[in-house]
Amino acid sequence: MATRRRTLLKVIVLGDSGVGKTSLMNQYVHKKFSLQYKATIAADFVTKELQIGNKLVTLQIWDTAGQERFQSLGAAFYRGADCCALVYDLNVSKSFDSLDNWHEEFLKQVPSLTLLYTEQANPSDPKTFPFIVLGNKVDIHGGRSRVVSEKKAADWCASNGNIPYFETSAKEDYNVDGPFLTIAKTALANE
Ligand code: GTP
Ligand code: MG
């Protein structure tokens, strides 16, 4: 029997408090959703096994705290990241505006973190680090209360290195699996 290599991919999920990072992960991994909000403190991870082609992939998904008071802890968890998912709430303009900040702050950490983590001689180029953007809560009022248009979000993604963009609902399990599969494939391609 051919030996199959198992690959571990580390994904960091970032975004403002309340955009639905924890909910997206719970829906993806446990197929559960709760309307009750419980702030994530610092960070935590869950894993999910995926089969991509003939590769077994373990996605290690790090759910971070969006609340500002926990953010100084954040960067410590970025170490060894293979991909970063940026999440905003389509109904909250500020959470979209914050993407610049999350993106920049993460990129600042990439060169040193990659050096610390890998044995590679050349750390990945921050400009080509794989990101993905999720516009969450597309279910609210059937999308009528959204304040960020699909075009605006897609333009932001295009001008930041052609980042793949998805609109999701953790509540209705809409478009949740697809982005995580894209994350895994993107990170694998960068291996
Ligand atoms: P922090 O841990 O503080 O960073 O927040 P978070 O980004 O993890 O948000 P969380 O997943 O805790 O969700 C915040 C609130 O939004 C909760 O009350 C969720 O039930 C709700 N929520 C999350 N996703 C959705 C969604 O897709 N649709 C709707 N309607 N509500 C959602
Ligand atoms: Mg959370």
Image: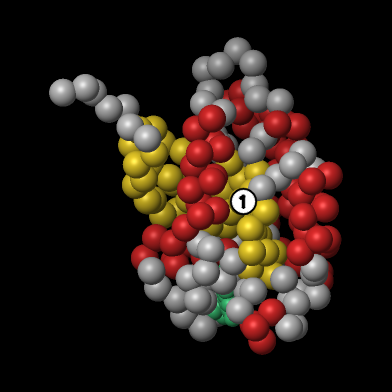
Residue 68, percent from left and from top: 71, 64
Asked if residue 182 lies left or right of residue 110, the reply is left
Asked if residue 71 lies left or right of residue 13, the reply is right
Residue plotted at (66% across, 48% down): 164
Disc 1: which residue: 85
Residue 145: quarter of image: bottom right
Residue 96, percent from left and from top: 78, 64
Residue 95, percent from left and from top: 76, 67
Question: In which quadrant of the rendered image does the N terminus lie?
Answer: top left
Extreme residue in the left direction: 1
The one nearer the camera, 124 or 181, is 181
Residue plotted at (80% across, 69% down): 148
Residue 49, percent from left and from top: 34, 47
Image quarter for ligand 1 equals bottom right
In the image, is residue 33 above or below residue 67? below
Extreme residue in the top direction: 121
Does any portion of residue 39 appear in the rendered image? no
Residue 28: quarter of image: bottom left
Q: What element carries label 1?
A: strand
Amino acid type, residue under disc 1 in the picture = Ala
In the image, is residue 82 above or below residue 138? above
Residue 139: quarter of image: bottom right
